[in-house]
Each structure stands twice: as structure tokens, then as C-alpha cells.
Image (tube, rainbow, N blue to C red):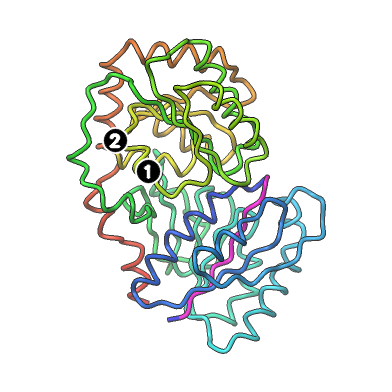
Amino acid sequence: MKIAIRTDASVEIGTGHVMRCLTLAKQLVQEGMEIIFICRAFKGNSISYIETEGFKVFTLSASSDKNHLLWMRESWREDAGDTAQILQHLDKEIDLFIVDHYSLDENWEKEIRTLVRHIMVIDDLADRIHDCDILLDQNFYLNLEKRYEGLVPASCQMLLGPNYVLLRDEFLSIDINRIKHDGTIQNILVFFGGTDPTGETMKTLKAICELNLSDIEVNVVVGAANPQKEEIEAFCNQRPEFVFHCQVNNMAELMMKSDLAIGAGGSTSWERCFLELPALTIIVADNQKELSKAVASKGALYCLGESAKITSWHIGKKINELCHSPAKMIGMIHMCREIIDPEMVRKRLVVKKVMEL
């Protein structure tokens, strides 16, 4: 089976779409699938990284200086035409075309429909109509079963909820029973995604410094596309309790040794929940609002709110509170178990569904 994946990364878009697609791609390769990526070369793209992970990438040019999501919405027909041209020149027909892009909808998908056998959409916004055979939304919402009513064909197979989450093998291989937490905080993990365009990492590091938590180790992770990575590294190097990491491949290990994670309210939430890691989150993008509020309402994390309204003072105040509230920490651990079932996730339900096509 030959599979094509259309996704993008950029400073505005972030790297989350690419990372979850890479996770799925690697699992499909293990089942004998042939995978190609189609990406546009926006500033802050992940094309080179995808290639270093062993995948062929067909690159679409990016000449516009506009916001990348806006450009894609306005120029969807051009993007569909460029994508179709690539598909028409492949030596084999595409059996499954996977689309993971907030700017693409049924109009774009209909342009591609005649060139591929099946279309799978990865989404979590539920704000537009799709023409697809499979829809994956791996997130937790209070109205999960009704979010896509009227937005997908009646025949579409729906894969909904955190038990369908796409986790890398480094997470799936972990024995959750080996993780022991007693509610105390001795290690904090700070990670706000691959680009952190709103600068939450520096905001958080300053908050931790103001608390003088010299007995707590702080692991700070940034992506290679983070525009502040040199400043963050220099800041960490001045403090012995801070450890700087860039573009890591051992995130599961770092999470396992952590007692509290501080980060964005996106897809990393499921890695944290899978490892029963309490979290303090900040909403850095519109698509994180509903997810963050839903998970917070279950008590599996504490959401501070939207980044524009959050200062170092707010972050420090909550960290200090959690450092003195082991019972609240243990409560978050217990609720992580209510949201995600590690045994179901290990079954790789998305890969199984693709294999059935």
C-alpha cells in the first residue's frame, strides 16, 4: 500500500501536525507501507527533519510572506493543483491520502479525490466540512461524539478520542507501572512545542527563577525551529538546576523522570496523560482552548488560560501552590488514568484501521 501525507509546519503553524504524522508514518512503515510526504516550504518548515527521519518529501514552493494558515485558506485551489501534479507523476497510485491541515477542507479534498483511492483527515477543530473516508480526532472533548455531525459523509469511519492517540514507540514501550509519583515535585519539565511563537518558555523560566527552587531540577526542551533557542540556552547555562535540550528524541524518558510538566495545551497533553504526568498548561493557539478546558474540567491538568493574559507571576504562583499541595498533584495523576487507557493505545487502533482498507 502506498500512502501520501499532506501536512505543513511553520512558525505560525507549529510542528505538531508534522510530528503526529511522522509518528503514524513510522508505525505504518513497520507494517510494510510505502510513505511519502508533501509539504510546502514555509519559513520554519520541518522538511529537512522529515527527510532525516527517512521519508521522501515532495516540496511545494512558498513565495508568499502572508500568514501561512491564511495563505493556505486563500490559495487552497493552487495548493490542490500543485499536489495533484505531484500525484499524477508518481509511479504508483496512492491507496490512502492523509491530510493533516487546519486550512484545508472538502473543497481541497474533492480536487484530490479522483487521484487517490481513500482519504483520511486528521483534525481536532470540527469547524469545516470534509470529504473523507476516515476521520481521526485523537483529542478529549465533552461533546466528542457529536462534534462532527454534518461535517463528514455518513459513510465516514470516525476514530474519536484519546485511545486513538498517535504516540511514538518510545512511549508505547514504557511500562506505566514503573512510574511512581508521590505528589512531591523534584523535577519539572518545560516544553512549549517545536516553535513556541508566543515565548512561553522564557516566561516560565523567569517564573521558576523567582521562586528560588534550587533543589528542583528543571529540564527545558525546545525545538530546532524555536526563534528564541539561543537566548533560552544562554539563560539555562547560567543556572545549575536548569538543563537545556534541543530537538530531543527522548521525550518519554524526560517525562518519566518528571513530577510536573509545564507546557502548551496541545497534543502533548496525551503524552503527559499516558505517562500520568501532572501538568500546568497555557493556551497558545485557538485550537487548544476547547481541549484544554475539557481536560482541565476532568482534573487531569491545570490550565492557566490564554498566553496573552498570563505573566510570569501567574505561572510562579501556581507552581508554588502545587509544590505545597501533594494531594492536588496525586489527584491529577488519578484523573489522567480516567482519560486515556494505555492498553488500548498500545493496540495502535489507527494503524489497524488503515490496514483494513
Question: Reading the chain from its start, which is encountered first: label 1 or label 2?
Answer: 1
Is 271 located above or below residue 53 in the figure? above
**Location of residue 346 in the rendering, given as x and y in whole percent from the top left corner:** 26, 55
- Which residue is tagged 2? 276
**Location of residue 255 in the rendering, given as x and y in whole percent from the top left corner:** 36, 37
Decide whether residue 4 is among the magenta residues. yes
**Location of residue 275 in the rendering, given as x and y in whole percent from the top left corner:** 30, 39
Q: Looking at this view, is 248 or 277 the one in front? A: 248
Query: Residue at (59%, 61%) from the top-left corner?
Result: 7
Q: Which residues are magenta?
A: 2-11
Decide whether residue 48 is among the magenta residues. no
Q: Where, quadrant-wise, is the C terminus in this rendering? A: bottom left
Q: Quadrant of residue 284?
A: top right
Indicate the amino acid at tag 2. Answer: Glu
Task: Give the residue furthest to the bottom.
Answer: 91
- Which residue is tagged 1? 271
